[in-house]
Amino acid sequence: MSLRHAILGLLDLKPMTGYDLKKAFDNTARHFWAADRSQIYRTLGNLHADGLLNEHVIRQRSRPDRHEYRLTEAGSAELDTWLRSPAPTELPREAFLARVYFAGRAEDPQLVRKLVDERRALVRQRLDELRALEAPTATYPERLRAMTLRNGIVHHEAELSWLDELEGAL
Amino acid sequence: MSLRHAILGLLDLKPMTGYDLKKAFDNTARHFWAADRSQIYRTLGNLHADGLLNEHVIRQRSRPDRHEYRLTEAGSAELDTWLRSPAPTELPREAFLARVYFAGRAEDPQLVRKLVDERRALVRQRLDELRALEAPTATYPERLRAMTLRNGIVHHEAELSWLDELEGAL
DNA sequence: GTCTACATGTAACTCGTTACATGATTAA
DNA sequence: TTAATCATGTAACGAGTTACATGTAGAC
């Protein structure tokens, strides 16, 4: 249910088209939310139909028109309401842990070794990516946004040390 | 796509009914996977139709029949294949981080304070629950299963120390 | 007499993924 | 000449959620 709110949040920072939003998700928001193009266009349509966004079409020569969206008052109110509403319970779905949980049946020590090695490579790579992103911290909203990156870093570090522990426990 | 495999994995440990599976998810697997009843029954039907499960109906007096499922050879092979296949990329969807990311717009220091306090209470409670579960570690499969619990513990601890850091950075 | 455990499902809906479909401009 | 960027979407499917629907036995 939060894709709607993530879109409202990004459009509050700056009015954008569906195309711009896809870039915003992939670049600045990719450490906490992923969104697919067709999902973005569909949700923009719903938010517009619900009166939470205004659409403003900009003609361009030799390119498709830009359909730029910005929050209406109702959209802004909805974003506030969401920020202040209690968090709905999140349910875990950790496919990697599921593999580890069931890997014992294989009677094959190489299987877990391989799971661990591949996981470590993935987590290290993502950690490097997170560290490479430099987030400004001059203003209060910037500091909050920077802290969400920091969240990713500490969890990736925790995962790496757990992988060491797992390897040691075999 | 992993609910199918989580079900195969649990049925490999012990043949079960849909009802039993729901309990298994809620009790022993809840730290890494959640599944809903209607999802379980639907998926059991699909797995059976695909020849990965055998169904065995047990008549009971004064209770509904038990429909007990166990892996076929094809089901067992499918579970193995999954355990050895490369992990598909997982995309983040962290609603709590999304709130923090957008909370700066509110110009209200109490908002982040409230988000942090509620989050801390939730994470502490879950951490207590994880610590309360005692997992046997006598055999190799048991040690693997215990390590998935340990994974939850280290991530919850990391989240708590990040929350302290966030509070300090305001 | 009320609640919990046992045990099965279906229907309707929303959310997320993948593939399909189009076409111009600009930089290497 | 090839790839990337700009810019829009639709269709079909799979996964997850919520509400509906039924009925007995045993414990408190």
Image (spheres, coloured by chain):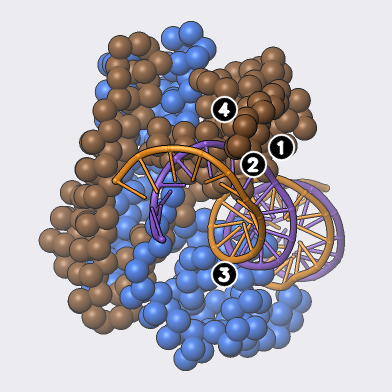
Chain colours: A brown, B blue, C orange, D purple
- Between the residue at mark 3 and the residue at mark 1, the CA separation in whole angstroms equals 42 Å
Give the residue furthest to the bottom.
B73
In the rendered image, which residue does mark 2 sit on?
Answer: A41
Marks 1 and 2: CB-CB under 8 Å? yes
In the rendered image, which residue does mark 3 sit on?
Answer: B20
Q: Which residue does the image show at 69% across and 24% down from the upper left?
A: A56
- Between the residue at mark 3 and the residue at mark 4, the CA separation in whole angstroms equals 49 Å
Give the residue furthest to the left.
A168
Q: Position of residue A87 (x, y in %)?
A: 54, 32
- Between the residue at mark 4 and the residue at mark 1, the CA separation in whole angstroms equals 14 Å
Q: Position of residue B40 (x, y in %)?
A: 61, 66
Q: Is residue A123 above or below residue B161?
A: below
Mark 1, secondary structure of its residue: helix
Q: Nearer the viewer, mark 3 or mark 1?
A: 1
Task: Give me the disc on residue A45.
Answer: 1
Q: Please tell me how crowded label 1 is: few (under 14), some (14-19), or many (20+) other residues with Cα within 10 Å.
A: some
Q: Nearer the viewer, residue A52 or B25?
A: A52
Mark 3, secondary structure of its residue: helix
In the rendered image, which residue does mark 4 sit on?
Answer: A16
